Amino acid sequence: MQTRAVANTSSAPTYSPTLALAFANAVEAAYNFYDNGTPISLAGYTIGPDIYVFELEKKTFFGYVATGTPPNSGIPQHNLVVFRGTRTKEEGFYDMDWSLVPGNLGGQAVGNVAKGLYDFYTGAGPLEKSLSQLTLEAISWFSDTSLPLYVCGHSLGGGVATLASLDIVLNNAYTAAAPIMYTYGGLHAGDQNFVTAFSTAVAAAFRVTNLADFVPQLTGLAADNTQYVHVGEQWWFVAYNSYLWENHELSNTYLTALTSYPSQVVNTPPPNFPASGA
């Protein structure tokens, strides 16, 4: 019988503005590679293999792994797993399925999870490996597995990072340390039972959220599903644009806050804004 790994919380990691910015830039590099073919380059990091997902039987770039640390940061070297967010119509389809289904990662029940996100991460074809399998394979590239492991992503990639962080632990894919997660405008992943499983296994999770961004608030289309619960610590800021999708953009909104206004990204209780028309 498998034994679930338990995160060591005796010295739980704390939020780092330096790493939050570095990892947001890492995700932006994934977007730039997908959108424009711009080679991935991060100062202070050695770039490893790409991570792919199969969409309509087509091999599609979805992320990569790297090893290093931001230059002159004083932060120890670490290994990094990076996921971009939604870019294709198929990915958008998965984004819209908010029904809750029993989740299983590493052969263990993990509570109820978002069906669209779960199918996107675990779905495989007769000749195609799942994103889960391909992520675990990419992790085998790391030559020094004594280093801390971070997982990051934006939007759909934030939801994938959430599943992947737990998946890595439950598959014993990185036994030296439990992952530490940073997400930006990330999706809900599951219910309270999922959060409990996640919190038991993953060392720490920091969700950077623009309170004007509707995506991290989504739990359904026709009506909200109140069973959803976010994992980890929320670090928030407010940047409102009249075009709603711009509130969600990594490049113009999240990176601007992390680069120019890092002190305004806080984890205090968020304000209670009045409902529209109140």
Image (spheres, rainbow, N blue to C red):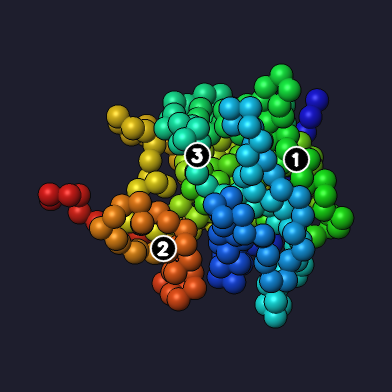
Q: Is residue 26 left or right of residue 175?
A: left
Q: Is residue 73 above or below residue 47?
A: below
Q: How many labels does the image show?
A: 3
Q: What residue type is labelled 2?
A: Thr
234 up-or-down from 95: above or below: below
Residue 144, position in %: x, y? 86, 57
User: Residue tagged by mark 1?
Assistant: 136
What x and y, as percent, mark residue 259?
A: 49, 73
Q: In which quarter of the image is the N terminus?
A: top right
Residue at position x 33%, y 32% in the image: 221
- The answer for how far apart the CA atoms under marks 1 and 3 are is 23 Å
Q: Residue 88 carries which label?
A: 3
- Asked if disc 3 and disc 2 are in contact, CB closer than 8 Å, the reply is no
Per the image, label 2 sits on a secondary structure element best described as helix
- State the SS at label 3: loop
Q: Which of marks 2 and 1 is nearer the N terminus?
A: 1
In whole angstroms, how far apart are the C-alphas of marks 3 and 2?
21 Å
Q: Could you tell me which residue is drawn at 72 percent across and 53 percent down? A: 65
Q: Residue furthest front?
A: 36
Instruction: Residue lying at the far right in this picture: please name it.
Output: 143
Task: Check the image and name the residue furthest to the top.
Answer: 126
Residue 16 appears anywhere in the view = no
Mark in the foreground, 1 or 3 = 3
Which residue type does callout 3 highlight?
A: Thr
Q: Residue at x 48, y 66 (%)?
A: 255
Q: Position of residue 278 (x, y in %)?
A: 12, 50
Residue 253 tag number:
2
Res 247 quadrant in image: bottom left
**Which badge, 3 or 2, comes first in the chain's sequence?**
3
Q: Which residue lies furthest to the left in this view?
A: 277
